[in-house]
Structure formats: structure tokens, C-alpha cells
Image: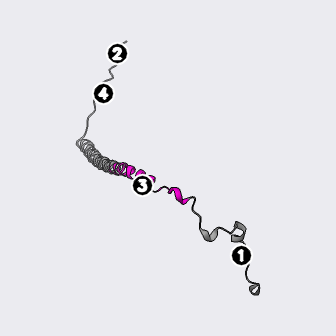
Amino acid sequence: MQAADFTTTTTTTPTSSAKCVNRLISTNMNLKKDINQFTATVCRWKDVDAEKKQITSGQESLRPSFKEAHTTLTEPQGLKSHQDDSLVGLSRTEERDITPPMDLI
């Protein structure tokens, strides 16, 4: 038995070569557009990350002053024990029980 020769030769016509080259050029151009869009997107992400870091650092710098303001704005000691003299004799039911005059009924 003889070994079969499986080598094949392909011949290309000039038109098919030109089509192949044009296809490669088109694909290359599309890839360049995609790479440019990707690069622009990454640059925008970097800008957004930089803005987030700047905002976060700004918030961190505000936090100590907020804590200080919160501790200074707490209720003074004497305010809880102080009562308004005009409300001393009223009970809750007297405050809520408001009846209209008889001539309006």
C-alpha cells in the first residue's frame, strides 16, 4: 500500500486576494475604532474615579468638623428641666378637648 499524498495547493485569483486584503483593512479600521472608544471610556472612568476620590477626601475633611458641630449642638443641661409657665396647669385632655361654641352647632 502506498501512502496517500494529502498536500493540496490552492491558487488564488487576484480578485479574491484583493477582497481578502480589503476585508483585513476594514477589520483593522474597525479594531482601531473599537480601541479608540475603549481608550476614551477608560479615560472617562479614570476621571470619574479621580472625582470620587476628590469628593471622598472632601467628605473626610468635613467629617471632623461635623462631629464637632454635633457635639456643640447637643441640648443644654438646663433646657430639659425648664417648663413654660403658661402650660403648667393644663392637662393633655384639656389641650385636646376643644368644643365649638353652641351657636355654631
User: Viewed as shown, does residue 84 lie left or right of 52?
Assistant: right
Real-space CA distance between mark 2 and mark 1, rounded to the nearest whole angstrom: 115 Å
Q: Residues within 10 Å of mark 4 (few under 14, many from 20)?
A: few
Q: What residue type is labelled 1?
A: Ile
* Residue extent of the magenta highlight: 54-79
In x, y percent, where is residue 87?
A: 63, 69
Q: Circle 2 — which element? A: loop
Which residue position holds label 3?
69
In x, y percent, where is residue 39?
A: 28, 47
Main secondary structure type of the part rendered in magenta: helix
Of tags 2 and 1, the one toward the viewer is: 1
Give residue 5's quadrant in the image. top left
Real-space CA distance between mark 4 and mark 2, rounded to the nearest whole angstrom: 15 Å
Mark number, residue 3: 2
Which residue position holds label 4?
8
Give residue 2's quadrant in the image. top left
Q: Circle 3 — which element? A: helix
Labels 4 and 1: the sequence-earlier one: 4
Real-space CA distance between mark 4 and mark 1, rounded to the nearest whole angstrom: 107 Å
**Camera-side residue: 55 or 38?**
55
Q: Which residue is drawn at the image coordinates 41% and 52% (left, top)?
A: 68
Real-space CA distance between mark 4 and mark 3, rounded to the nearest whole angstrom: 86 Å
Labels 2 and 1: the sequence-earlier one: 2
Real-space CA distance between mark 1 and mark 3, rounded to the nearest whole angstrom: 42 Å
Q: Circle 1 — which element? A: loop
Q: How many labels does the image show?
A: 4
In x, y percent, where is residue 26?
A: 27, 47
Residue 64 position (above or below residue 104): above
Of tags 2 and 3, the one toward the viewer is: 3
